[in-house]
Image (tube, rainbow, N blue to C red):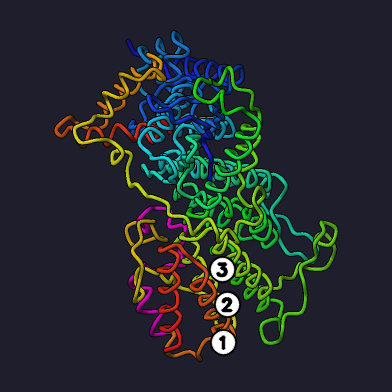
Amino acid sequence: MKLYSLSVLYKGDAKVVLLKAAHDVSSFSFFQRSSVQEFMTFTSQLIVERSSKGTRASVKEQDYLCHVYVRNDSLAGVVIADNEYPSRVAFTLLEKVLDEFSKQVDRIDWPVGSPATINYTALEGHLSRYQNPREADPMTKVQAELDETKIILHNTMESLLERGEKLDDLVSKSEVLGTQSKAFYKTVSTQHLPPRCSLQRTVAACCFWHSLL
Amino acid sequence: MAETNEEVAVLVQRVVKDITNAFRRNPHIIDRCHMHPAASKPRLYHCMEREHGSSIYKMRKNQQRRLGRKELILSGTLNPIKDLHLGKLALTKFPKSPETWIHRRWVLQQLIQETSLPSFVTKGNLGTIPAERTQRLIQEEMEVCGEAAGRYPSNYNAWSHRIWVLQHLAKLDVKILLDELSSTKHWASMHVSDHSGFHYRQFLLKSLISQTVIDSSVMEQNCLRSEPALVLPKDEEAAASTEEPRINLPHLLEEEVEFSTDLIDSYPGHETLWCHRRHIFYLQHHLNGRFPQSMTQLSPADSPGGTLSDLHLIPAGSQLSQAMEVDGLNDSSKQGYSQETKRLKRTPAPDSLGLEMEHRFIDQVLSTCRNVEQARFANAYRKWLVTLSQ
């Protein structure tokens, strides 16, 4: 079981702002790591964009699960994990991180912050410690109260998109993805499926991580 | 232009030297070989061409006859150990590659057959144990398999190879089996949906049971007829002493049940864990029933109320057709099940205390779980237990 990334974001009215992120891309091959990291940021932002305030959701895509928690005060967290990692622990982690973050970083800095300006350093440590859920959270078995909360389950990334919206367009418009990542995305998505059906292509495009492994 | 065999051999030697030097200088060279993930064969030498250009390419152009790695090894040009190292690197990029694993087994077989040194030695009352060189080979293979298993989920080829090594190189040496059982425990707990990983543990336990039965019949011991009171010595010295290592099988199986309980509670909703529990329960029952070997598989997919499985289960018929037949104890799942129900109907009922405990465990899970899948698996397990006692 594995955690790949942990991010703190702010869901502004106009757009979603990344405040801080930590990644573990050691299982990806060397030359793909920076692209993977960018795609994870892209995905985290997209998920927060499409999630309402005061909700928790898990978005499934192939072997990955993206868990998101958007608080009522617009502070949000996304953890990207594999499908073995217990979601209970993932949401515990998000709750803990956002709580800690909100105490250490002034609210006034959230809407305009960026990873460079935000002073919060605990993220890497949390990500590393939570790789082993039982060591990090021994009380995992008794997380009854969290199970009471309703968690929305999306079976694919595609269900977050609006009708007619294409992931390809979102990728090419993205400010988060570098040119190399965008080019890589294009190669991957065209090689995996013949473009007979644009819907299929959109879904296949979401599986780029899988192809990178 | 015809070349003599010697000329070709010289060229080949240069190539192999180039490859070896390149790897020595940069062990991560395999990473720089951008191969499309959909590529089916690890084109190791093509990769080296790109990275290392001239000499290999020139050689390709010149040679009349293409020499495969087997020929290189048989002719003594390529050191089998170096070839294993090359294979190890190839597996970092293609952890599933059947050809790589198959070739690896061929190389290992060459190594143990050709050497003039014995691969097994007699050591006092311990009977025969693997020689140091063999032990090193075994350890290396365990590592390679472990790494490959980590790179691809439920890597059947890697785990099957691991089993093959224990069967053919280690000859199911009890100490090695026990070491493997303890050393893979943490890995299994961190890969709770890796069916092949848990199947490996089932193989280890089954082998320990069969090896104990063999030992006891050879040594004329009563360990199966009375409570096995002797516990495995924990330290190295004890193992090397004149005392033969004895295994407390019921204790090992109990520990595995506890392990299973712990994982099922901590990680709800993984069918692999429930499947593993069935196997352990069955092994316990089998042990209590005092039946010897030839245990067949119980595939949960065949049981009534059987759960759907998108995990590939332990060798189904198609996989048994593989040349190596690593899991010779198993029938194909469906056949095995009907044979097994017949056998079960003839045997005494499973130990009622054990059954009662399992039912209580299921009750506890159902009363506290909020995961839909977990409830489904628990109910399926209950139904399976009921069929056992019919």
Q: Residues within 10 Å of mark 3 (few under 14, many from 20)?
A: some
- Farthest residue in the top direction? B54
Residue B351's tag is 1
**Nearer the observer, B83 or A7:** A7
Q: Are marks 1 and 2 on the same chain?
A: yes
Q: Which residue is mark 3?
A: B206
Measure the alpha-carbon separation of dots 1 and 3: 19 Å
Q: Are marks 1 and 2 in contact (CB under 8 Å)?
A: yes
Instruction: Determine if residue B104 is in view.
Output: yes
Amino acid type at image mark 2:
Gln
Amino acid type at image mark 1:
Asp
Along the polypeptide, which appears first: circle 2 or circle 3? 3
The range drawn in magenta is B319-343
Q: Indicate the position of residue B312 as horizontal and vertical percent values.
A: 38, 56
Question: Badge 1 sits on which subunit?
Answer: B
Q: Which residue is mark 2?
A: B284
Residue B163's tag is none
Q: Look at 56% across and 17% down and name the residue there.
A: B22
**Nearer the observer, A49 or B366:** A49
Along the polypeptide, which appears first: circle 1 or circle 3? 3
Q: Indicate the position of residue B259 as horizontal and vertical percent values.
A: 62, 64
Q: Residues within 10 Å of mark 2 (few under 14, many from 20)?
A: many
Element carrying mark 3: helix
Q: Look at 42% across and 14% down and name the residue there.
A: B50
Element carrying mark 1: loop
Q: Closer to the observer: label 1 or label 3?
A: 1
Instruction: Determine if residue B91 is in view.
Output: no
Q: B79 above or below B25? A: below
Q: Indicate the position of residue A124 as horizontal and vertical percent values.
A: 62, 31
Q: Look at 61% across and 64% down and name the residue there.
A: B262
- Residue B117 image-quadrant placement: top right
Q: Are marks 2 and 3 on the same chain?
A: yes
